[in-house]
Amino acid sequence: MSSNLSIAIVGLPNVGKSTLFNALLKKQLALAANYPFATIEPNIGVVEVPDSRLAILAKIVNAAKIVPAIVEFYDIAGLVKGASEGEGLGNQFLSHIRETSAIVYVCRLFENKDIIHVYDSVDAHRDLSIVESELIFADLQTLQKQNDRKPPVLPPSMSLKLTPELWKETLTKLISHLNAGKPLRTLQMTEEEALIAKMLSLLTTKRAIYVYNLSEAQLKSYQNNSGDFIREYKLEVNANESVFLNAKLESDLASFSPEDAAMLLEEYHLSLSGLDLLIRQAYKTLGLISYLTAGEIEVRAWTIPDGATAVEAAGVIHTDFIKNFIKAEIVSMDNFVKYSGWSKNRELGNVALVGKEHVMKDGDIVNFKIANN
């Protein structure tokens, strides 16, 4: 089980992808220029996941360092209509999306005559449809290439018994759904069908987050009444998949001191930056949580799927921990803080000793007992 979370940032040219990426990295790594295809290679950046619990734990255990969980963001060049067939910079960029866990669709809502748009008008629904269609077409090409081929030979470790009949039936089902203009994440699949789709690295199986890039005035309007704003712009919004922000503001916030950033957020009546909301949304969308380890060497957050067991969580630290797992000590954050660490909590019986099948919770503080090789 990998603890890496990777997200592709996609959208039409000049919708604010690179500005958002720059803000995420808190430095200008991407070229946010005012012309299409300013991003020539996919910029990849590692971003720390904000977690205020880590500093609190570090103070209690006097840790030498803090290691937050991380997210990898891929800034993909602007897609245009026909990208799946080589238009613009073509599907060389689509291949970079295959390596990621989720896709962030950046959609422009702001009006600015000084910034070139691929089309004459700003239309969120049209822009999202174009980008989604290109990913659908790319998946169709992948599946159609497989149609005349025999099913691949799977390693013995995979539980799937891949017969020619199952292979053909699954490809037909996936193609039919895509031909209806629907991404594969909206298709009900059996476990076997989902494994085949995953094996083919199909783009539209990935979970989606929609980032709407607003002007500062629009952001204030959204904050005042989000419902009216969404109706005014005729947006088809799922609150569990959407983030509204101003990418330029986020870039400014990233360069400010924490004190100045807090003042600016207060001016916009925001409790969190859009970037923090985006990372939180990514965890929620992908069903991820973090557990924590706390010792003198380091305090660290580890990313795991919600519902992961103790032995699976141990495997994120090192694969050898899976076969050598004995037990795990777990204490709640509240008790760890209240009684200042492991020692007093052990005395009071607040530390649970659990086995492999224990289901982890977000914020669990864990000490794994591992057998020596």
Image (cartoon, rainbow, N blue to C red):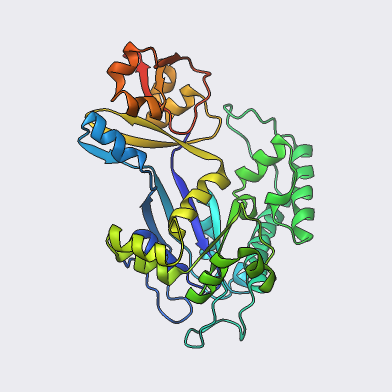
Q: Position of residue 35 (x, y in %)?
A: 45, 82
Instruction: Identify the residue at image location x=58%, y=71%.
Output: 86
**The C terminus: image quadrant:** top left
82 lies above or below 97: below
Residue sitting nearer the eye, 75 or 141: 75
Instruction: Identify the residue at image location x=38%, y=24%.
Output: 335
Quarter where residue 238 is shown:
bottom right
Whether residue 130 is visible to the viewer of this picture, yes or no, is: no
* Relative side of 199 to 309, left or right: right
Badge count: 0
154 lies above or below 206: above
Residue sitting nearer the eye, 276 or 76: 276
* Relative side of 131 to 149, left or right: left
* Relative side of 241 to 325, left or right: right
Q: Position of residue 350 (x, y in %)?
A: 40, 16
Instruction: Identify the residue at image location x=37%, y=37%.
Output: 301
